[in-house]
Image (spheres, grey):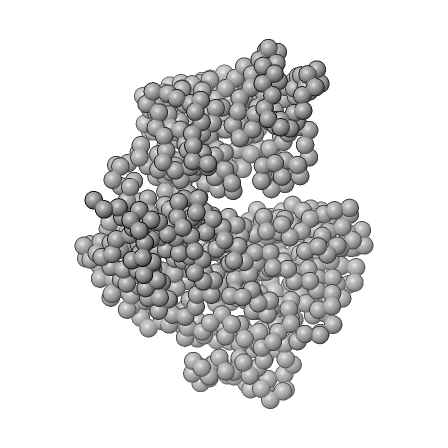
Amino acid sequence: MPDTIIFSDLDGTLLDSADYSFAAARPALGLIREREIPLVLCSSKTRAEIEDYRWRLNNEHPFIAENGGGIFIPRGYFSVPFEAVAFDDYYLIQLGIPYIEIRRRFVALRERLGIKVRGFGDMTNAEVTVLTGLTRKEAALAKRRDFDEAFVFDGPPDESFLKAITTDGLHWTQGQFFHILGDHDKGRAVKLLELLYRQEYGAVASIGLGDSLNDLPMLQAVDRPVLVKKADGGFDARIDLPGLLKTQHPGPFGWNDAVLQLLVAPAQAHADSARQTLTGIFDAALAAVDPYRAVFDAMHIEDGHLLAGGTPYDLAACERIVVVGAGKATARMALAVEELLGERISSGLVIVKQGHSAPLRIVEQVESSHPVPGAAGAAATARMLDMLRDADDKTLAICLLSGGASALLVAPVEGVTLQDKQQTTTLLLNAGASIAELNAVRKHLSAVKGGRLAQAAAPAQLVALILSDVIGDRLDVIASGPTAPDASTYADAWAALEKYGLQDKLPSRVLEHLERGLAGQEAETLKAGAPCFGRTQNLIVGSLAQALAAAAEKARQLGFVAEIVAADLQGEARDAAHRLARRAHATLAAMRAGERRCLLWGGETTVTVHGGGMGGRNQELALAFALEIDGMSGIALLSAGTDGTDGPTDAAGATVDGGTAARARGHGLDPVAYLANNDSYHFFRRLDESSGGHSHLKTGPTGTNVMDLQVVLCEKEMPA
């Protein structure tokens, strides 16, 4: 039975004002779920918009839409009786005037006064997208209004128009935009819901969080009001209440701090601040390489043509559009392609890593194992190749590729079995082979890699949208280059195996095939100049460089001097940890008291497995870094995979500081022994279990993949 209810605004409060992400609030959101505290979203957003965020937040509680115009209560949520009307899966308590009447009176006022003002109803989806930064799909949801009209002035706000609204018997308020509405507000809706909760559960306390004038009635209605700092570092001066808690940070960072402060001991909340900053910077990087947005940035429809990277494809001349692909991020990429092309898509199939699917309605998706190829991936790849071989010169094939495709897009050459490829891949991974070395071998054992997917699609036009997960964004390396010319040879594949001494450990069929290739008895992968590449366009739509730039910008917003040190971090994870720690130590030593710096790296390290533990390259790097900075204050690190997974574990990576190793020893854990056993996963899991901390970073599948990020914070303390 809950003893607390939280009412929260969205834009600028729980959601970042720039990218609409709530990632920085994850620690507090997790605590809310753990304690089963109802989180009631109370926003100027429409019902359709809030439903989308409720799905993302896994939120099943009532919500308040359009500044209190409607309270939507899931059926069966309350057992106490209340007056409402049935509405889809909800009971609706309607407090607002229907949108059609609001819209009619808004237009009449504008025409009578001759004021240059536009409502969302006057704008196309594209115009709302430009105004808000939403995607076109999200903009369409924002236009589906029920109780109020969002509007903007063409120039400074006109006080005469605002006064005319109230004279006409309506009201206006202001959040991210101005809104014209009837006799309702967030406060009235909050009071009604508070009453229902108290009738259902007895005495409950209420917390309200907002950042703008339209939140004032809500903040007046709750027991503990919280005013969230705006992105520019200020507060809405029109909001001043007794007992008002003001956050130190803007948006979801401030939201997270305030909720933790109100729900847990202040000391514990303070201890999590470095981790929250690190994860906030990491989340900003993820948002910048979201595959869904990346597709819309790369492609759009104009005058009956699909423009991809500036190249037009006449949709009227395309008798069929086939969508194929593979990789950890391709489900979200396919979601965007479906949104863009809809029923124009004739057929489609993408192969994703287990747990990385999305709610697709046209393009089929198959989950398979990674990083070792699986039977599901092999069967789906065979079907995909059949689809492409049926294509003709009036077919447009769209291929979606991202990290993970090398293992998911699997078609062994004739004479080599899937089990042979699995064994070979495992040998190379455990030996610490780089992605380029691994792919050189895989391409020469494949009927789809090394340009052969493009060959299968000919004579169709082929557009490949590629989310890069390799250093240097090389088309022949990403996903093992299924749509690009391949520069590697059988000799390169053999050299990689010789380097790690694996020739005598290979399956006999693999060994025989590679030996025939070296002797010129097997066809090479496709090289530049092959005819199929004349009708193929490869577009990089997202990369590590974009993620690092966004991380640096977020760090600057949080008051750090940010530097991107390198985007090509490679080598053994523990060796990389040593280099990062040396740079952090030198940076801190040269800083002035009170100075804050953020150092950023990206790339992909490797781990040579000697022990019997479990982990991944990011967790191993973090553990090694913790030992390098043992006992030092003012340094903290996050190392994580942008795909949300690190090795064969459910973690993306970990965060550490100068006290991590000492805390571990205090709980009977020997960090040196865990590192020697390559058991970083169990080290961080047991440390968190013992200490109640949150060193392990577990994001779940992120839907993107542009290699790994390392974020190091250096903060020079002020003298006592």
Q: Residue furthest right?
A: 317
Q: How many discs appear?
A: 0
Above or below residue 372? Residue 142 is: above
**At 41% from the left edge and 44% from the top edge, which residue is drawn?**
558
> x, y percentage for residue 469?
52, 62
Residue 455 percent across, percent down from the top left: 69, 70
Nearest the camera: 467 or 162? 162
* Residue at (57% x, 46% y) in the render: 359
Q: Is residue 605 above or below residue 288?
A: below
Left or right: residue 113 versus residue 133 is right
* Most foreground residue, 178 or 364: 178
Where residue 621 appears, as percent x and y from the top left, is 35, 63
Could you tell me which residue is drawn at 58 percent across and 40 percent down?
A: 133
Can you say which quadrant of the picture contains the N terminus? top left
Query: Closest to the observer: 277 or 68?
Result: 277
Image quarter of residue 40: top left
Residue placed furthest toward the bottom: 519
**Vertical placement of residue 249 versus 709, above or below:** above
Q: Nearer the viewer, residue 282 or 85?
A: 282
Q: List x then y, in percent, for residue 380.
A: 60, 62
Quarter of image, res 252 = top left
Q: Quadrant of residue 154?
A: top right
Residue at x-position 52% and y-position 17%:
184
From where the camera sits, is residue 217 visible? Answer: yes
The quarter of the picture where the C terminus appears is top left
Quick check: can you spot residue 201? no
